[in-house]
Amino acid sequence: MEERISLYERLRRLLPAYAQLFGFSFFTNILVLVPSIYLMQVGERVFTSKSYETLLFLTAIAVFLMIVMSILHWLRGESLKRIALNLDEQLRGKVFAAVHRFGRRSVDGPRYFNDLDAVRDALSGPFIPALFDTLLSPIFLIVLFIIHPVFGFLGLTVTLLLGGLSAMNLMIVERPNKNAREAQAKALEFAVATNRNVETARSMGMVAGLGERWINFHGRAAGWQTLAQQRSAGITGLIRFIRMSQMILIIGVGALLYLDDAVSQGATYASMLIMMRGLGPVEALVGQWRSVSNARAAVQRLNKLLAEADQFQTSLSLPRPAGHLTASGVVVGTPGKKGTLVRDVSFSLQAGRILAIIGDSGAGKSCLLRTLAGIWSPTGGTVALDGHSLTHWDPGELGRYVGYVPQDVDMLPGTVAENISRFYPASAENEALLFEAAELAGVTDLIQSLPNGFNTILGPNGHVLSGGQRQRIALARAVYGRPVIVFLDEPNSALDARGEALLIAAVQRLKAQGTTVILVTHKMNMLPYCDDVLVMHSGALQAYGQREEILQRLPHQKPTPLKVIEGHRGS
């Protein structure tokens, strides 16, 4: 079993590598002094001696050392990239699995992937080198003190002044920037939801109203950003003034010292270069602080996500279940909000039986189904498959035993074959299961009618399927791999009479194979083919039992059986 460690612990384990790079940076910062020393030597030796040989010798040494410095800088950059990439390789699979383990939708899922990119970029970007160089800035101050104490005190004063102003600037803009990020997330979430329903919005003239709502969200984000900029404007201007004036200060002070014969002319110019180099990392560090702040927030979100996912890891591989499902006191709350959607539902369904969940709209049928399928985690109670709580199963392993058709079916970018086969690697065994699933679901003829058959590209930029076609392809995907339990959420909502007949035939074949089927339906004509019925009302279980027993208690429900198509191949 893989060791469970937090993201913070993973980052702490990188500290030895960064410590070595910090020591490595010591030499690069020493070599940064080469241009200043070269300038001093040229001023004091070449200009006085007018020696071509001395100039050539000094230049050759300086160029060689600058080449070495460039190589060291490149090696440091490559090392940072490798460290960041190694952490990314450790986390990318975990983040993807964790996001989909909890069914993150809307903007939440992409946000976590962007968080992973933000962490990698922060670890491999210019912030770490700037931090190292800032910590080594005292080297330059020491050199300035060696040249002349006045230069040293001047450099120390400017460094402390810039550092203090920068810290103050970060403190006053932290809160507005945080609020701006939250507002931007809400604006993006609303934009994604609007784009997903753009056809409905356009057909009913909702675009203008939705646009006003998005403008409001976007305006809040822009307002917080503007407030942050206004708060920092004065301090930023003062920092800019000090940065631009430091050259004048050191040249002026150097000129006074030169007039007093305290330093040479070359030492004055060299001190100017050293001070600029010593303060450069501080300025770079301040410039990168916003990206670092975003990366810090990203680390917090990722650590929380991965910590939640670790709770569901299993220590051993459980045997293939038979399909016996048990719900004990299941309570389901609204994801991310307060409120209860399902209250205290308990029942036991034997393997190989067909259960219909019925009830009025809003009764909690789909919420219960998602929880039984392991898509949602119950806020109370447990759901068990063959006696093992769903939390004890590895999600990837459990998924091979489960089939699911959602109420709103969408196809993933890929071929028909890839969608049905759940994107498992191509193999002779998987191809056999693919054709078996298509035959069982009755979609073989449907697939043959598509432009490229099983190789037809689906998804946002692929072939457009009707709602009924998507539902039938989704049924084939659900039964792929001979699952032990299949969950169907309104599987006939977009089907015509023939499609419904093919659906019933598929359900009966699943029953004959010993597969457990749980379906949510509003259409009573599917009940004659079910063994058991569960009635939901206002989020609570109203009745549960064998079909005939429940239908006798619901005299207003008179289901009409559908004509089942035998020996079908679909159309």
Image (cartoon, helix red, strand yellow):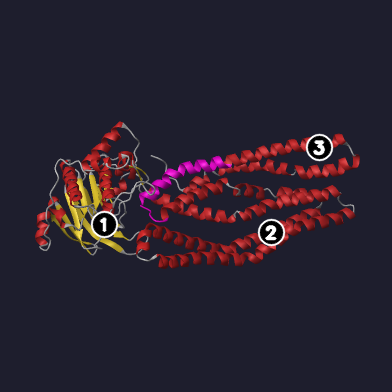
Q: Name the residue under label 1.
A: 366
Gap in angstroms between the C-alphas marked 1 and 3 = 80 Å
Between 306 and 438, which is closer to the camera in this rendering? 438
Quarter of the image with the N terminus in it: top left
Q: Is 103 part of what is drawn in magenta? A: yes
Residue drawn at (38%, 53%) of the image: 104
Q: Give the magenta-colored segment's residue range.
A: 80-107
- Would you say the residues marked 1 and 3 are in contact, meaning their CB atoms lie under 8 Å apart? no
In the displayed structure, would residue 104 be above or below residue 46?
below
Q: What is the crowding at mark 3: few (fewer than 14 residues within 10 Å), some, or many (at least 20)?
A: some
In the image: residue 456, left or right of residue 266: left
In the displayed structure, would residue 341 be above or below residue 399?
below
Q: Name the residue under label 3.
A: 58
Residue 194: x, y in percent? Answer: 40, 60
The tag earlier along the polypeptide, 1 or 3, is 3
| Amino acid, disc 1 | Ser
Q: What is the crowding at mark 2: few (fewer than 14 residues within 10 Å), some, or many (at least 20)?
A: many
Q: Mark 2 points at which residue?
A: 162
Residue drawn at (35%, 61%) of the image: 200
Gap in angstroms between the C-alphas marked 3 and 2 = 35 Å
Residue 494: x, y in percent? Answer: 24, 54
